[in-house]
Image: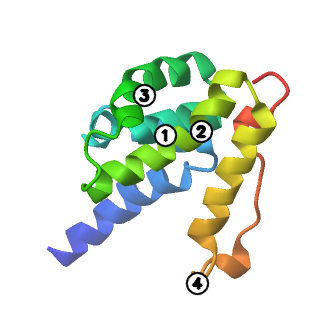
Amino acid sequence: MIEDLLLVIATEALPRLRAIDSLPAFWAVYTDGTDRKVPQWPETRLIFHIALGDLVAARALHETLEPELRENRYPDVPWVQKRRRMVLSVAEPLLAGDRAARANILHGWEADNIRGTKIAPYWEPTPFPLEDASA
């Protein structure tokens, strides 16, 4: 059984993981329909749309999330408050078309998630697709 597992890891899992060499490549795997994460966490989809520079999708998703989050219907639910802070922090620059502010927010989150981890010495910040001139 262990040999079969190692074979599957080597022939199926590792090639798929090695192919994830960019944010768009990760998004393609993340949204390939084989996982329930994507529909479950709309704030994650919103952040990905922003990072990828897909402002039409990001604004449409924000429009569906904003009323509930703006009203703060669940002030005592920690995961709702985390979602609320995340979405509301990008709302103004998203709606205003402020690319630099969106990028600064995302780079800040990225650094916060890396700082203090074992991979911090190897991390090099790179531009998000939204920072591309055509985004």
Q: Is residue 31 visible?
A: no
User: Which of the 4 image quarters holds residue 99?
Assistant: top right
Q: Position of residue 76 (x, y in %)?
A: 25, 56
Callout 4: SS? loop
Image quadrant in which the N terminus is located: bottom left
Compare marks 2 and 3 and give the one earlier in the sequence: 3
Q: Residue at x 71, y 70 (%)?
A: 123
Q: Nearer the viewer, residue 75 or 85?
A: 75
Alpha carbons under labels 1 and 3: distance apart: 8 Å
Q: Nearer the viewer, residue 12 or 30?
A: 30
Q: Nearer the viewer, mark 1 or mark 4?
A: 1
Alpha carbons under labels 4 and 2: distance apart: 28 Å
Alpha carbons under labels 4 and 3: distance apart: 36 Å
Alpha carbons under labels 1 and 2: distance apart: 6 Å
Compare marks 4 and 2 and give the one earlier in the sequence: 2
Image height check: is 1 above or below 58? below
Query: What colour scheme has been applied to the protein in the rendered image?
Result: rainbow
Give the amino acid type for the residue marked by disc 3 in the picture: Glu
- Judging by the rendered image, the residue that carries numbered circle 3 is 66
- Judging by the rendered image, the residue that carries numbered circle 4 is 118
